Image (cartoon, rainbow, N blue to C red):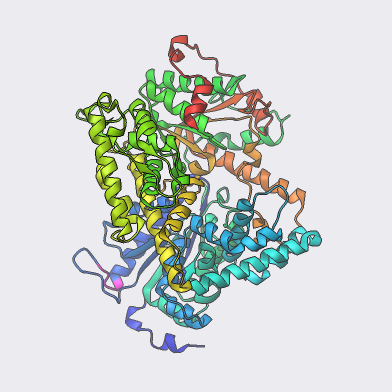
Amino acid sequence: MTSKFDASFDSSKRSPLSAKDSRWIQGKTRSGKSARLVETLSEWHQTIAQSVPMPTARRVPTQGDRGFLVFAANGENRIELVDRIEAQTQGRSLFDSTTPLGFFQSELLLFWPLVAEQLQLNVQFPLRLRPETEQMLATRLWQPRLDRGELAIDGVRDYYVVRRILDLLQIAASTNVPVNEIALVLTEGYGDQRLELWNHMGDALQEWQRWCLQQGLLTYGLISDLYGRVLLRHEQYRYQLRRRYQAVLADDVDDYPAIAHDLFDVLLNLGLAGCFTYNSRGALRQGLGADPEELAQLAHRCQVELRTSAPEDSLGATWGSSLWQRVSVPLSNAELPDAIQSIQTVSRAALLRQTAEVIQTAVQQGQVEPKDIAILGPGLDAIARYTLREILSRRGIAVTVLNDQQPLSSSPTIRALMTLMALVYPGLGRLIDRDAISEMLVVLSQRPGLELSQSVQFAIDPVRAGLLTDYCFRPDPTQPMLLPVTVYDRWDRLGYQATESYKSLSEWVQEQQQQQQQRLISNPVVLLDRAIQQFLFGGSHLPYDQLAALRELMETAQHFWDVDARLRQTQRTDTPVSDTVEAFIHLLQGGTITADPYPVRRNRANTQAVTLATLYQYRANRSSHRWQFWLDAGSTLWLSGGTPLFGAPLFWRHRPNQLWSATEEFQINGDRLQRNLLDLMGRTTERIFLCHSDLATTGQEQNGPLMGLVNTVSSLDPKLDPSLHADDESPAEALGKAT
């Protein structure tokens, strides 16, 4: 049956491609799936160019042009995929690149009038909430329920209870389960012994959904829910999809949510051609919102291409099955190559030191370059990151940490700016202490170094900062003050630079206080920007990690006050600005915000640095190295780490509605371990070092799933030079600096 929208479709814009041209490209790690997808796009581009004029570098694309819709699993993969497409097509192909969740968000905002009309919403243009703001507002909304104990879970803090419930909304939305059915799914999966708790969770989520829609606020869960249940089913929206695109290409669909399958199914039904890549050993995000079993159903609608040839130099291609047999059957006699060795020590501190020494020796002897080395682990604590980075850096070997998402509050620069805000706005004196003032005086007295070897210098050192704090800082709950330097009777001993820097800072604070009282500062974001320009010179001289922290601070602050302005408008409240600033500072101090600004893109092609990453980060990055060091090989986290979010397996479409069992959980953990090991082996070409210490950081003996493998392979016994680590810090010193 032809709809009224199909009848108005311009036949001159029809594509020579159709759904029958769709391809399903399946293969193992590094088997060339992404390269084949790029080749497919280039072939289709040439086919279309021969039949229908396409935009080129000489013609500006018009509204009537139909391009390609290209998906990647995450933002970093999207950037790399775009670069490959641009190089393959020489920039002549018209396409939109996105991630599944990014596409749902942009489409929902673009077609919001359709959604508002369908749901009969009388709200203005929506504003998306970031996860940390979502957590704060949901906690505030559910506080009465938390106080009554309706949402209590034994042994779980309220913070994580709220996070679990919000995650349930995201997981349910990703598979198109309505929010009013979440309690039923939990009851079927976990039993009715806690029926009251499941019902309270369902009621809380429905309350949260109604509240957000009334305020015009969208979370990631609501975005997925509204897109899958409302927008994607709208006839006019489907017509617009058909008018805009003529083919869809998606890389690594094993990491996509179930509603992505619904979208691709709709696009194929509309006549668009599709090209999808799939790795049965991938499924990195299974249990975190992805449903690879559901996406695999697309293969029945495509021409299947199996990429059976893995890279010949990959250890996974030749020894992957043998290694997994050794792990899964400890008494197996499967042969393993000499390329897999172990580094074993008693303590973890010695293990970190010896691992660094093995890397240093190999680099100095020219066996491998730093950029060809990766140190991986199921979890990287602050001690491991700090120790490995410090030891290798002292020996001239750079270290880069993939997605090093440290809390913003761990940055001295961010803490100094937070202290500055508490000084300017009244009523925030209890948020700062003398140590915070001393740190602020040092950090905000920095100046770009005069020499290239000196990136930054400080006019106020910690000793002078302590003296200034003791004599010139007046604590007060309402309005703490920086007093004139002359109140210290021996101020002449501070030195000219320290005195002038302190005067400049105290006068600037007084000026901002006056402007704040006169309402000349529109919002705290303006204050932060002024402080960065005044004391940090716009961040122009800062290293990348500190600059990234500043960027994330500004993005977070801008978002926070956008949400605050929306709530003041919809709820017609007149909360003092100081209360909002206090809430913002508490949010930063909570450690939920990390230095991950958008967009983050660093050129790693020419970086001569050792890669340090968790298993999840490394697999998501989809890179490969000649040498891999598997840190904490004896840890139980290799099996238990990366477990699914609370309730996630209950929402998988391929799973029957039945009680969740310990057998299923054991099977899921085993499957995830197998995928992790085989994928890691597929991403290394020469050597794997199993780094194991008898004792973990906690002092307990380790007995993880890889212990049989560790005890089987030959142990590396390098000739260590005591002088190599004579200047290294003790574990206690490392712990102090890392924390």
Magenta: predominant secondary structure element? loop
The answer to which of 259 and 264 lies nearer the viewer is 259
Q: Is residue 461 above or below residue 582?
A: above
Q: Is residue 727 above or below residue 644?
A: above
Q: Position of residue 412 (x, y in %)?
A: 39, 38
Residue 52 part of the magenta segment: yes
The answer to which of 184 and 649 lies nearer the viewer is 184
Q: Position of residue 352 (x, y in %)?
A: 52, 24
Q: Is residue 423 above or below residue 37?
A: above
Is residue 455 visible to us here?
no
- Residue 362 lies in quadrant: top left
Q: Is residue 171 left or right of residue 310?
A: right
Q: Position of residue 546 (x, y in %)?
A: 35, 40
The answer to which of 525 and 627 lies nearer the viewer is 525
- Residue 639 lies in quadrant: top right
Identity of the residue drawn at 20% across and 27% down: 451
Q: Is residue 571 above or below residue 420?
A: below
Identity of the residue drawn at 52% across and 39% down: 614
Q: Position of residue 548 (x, y in %)?
A: 36, 45
Residue 140 part of the magenta segment: no
Identity of the residue drawn at 46% across and 48% down: 588
Stretch of the chain drawn in magenta:
51-55
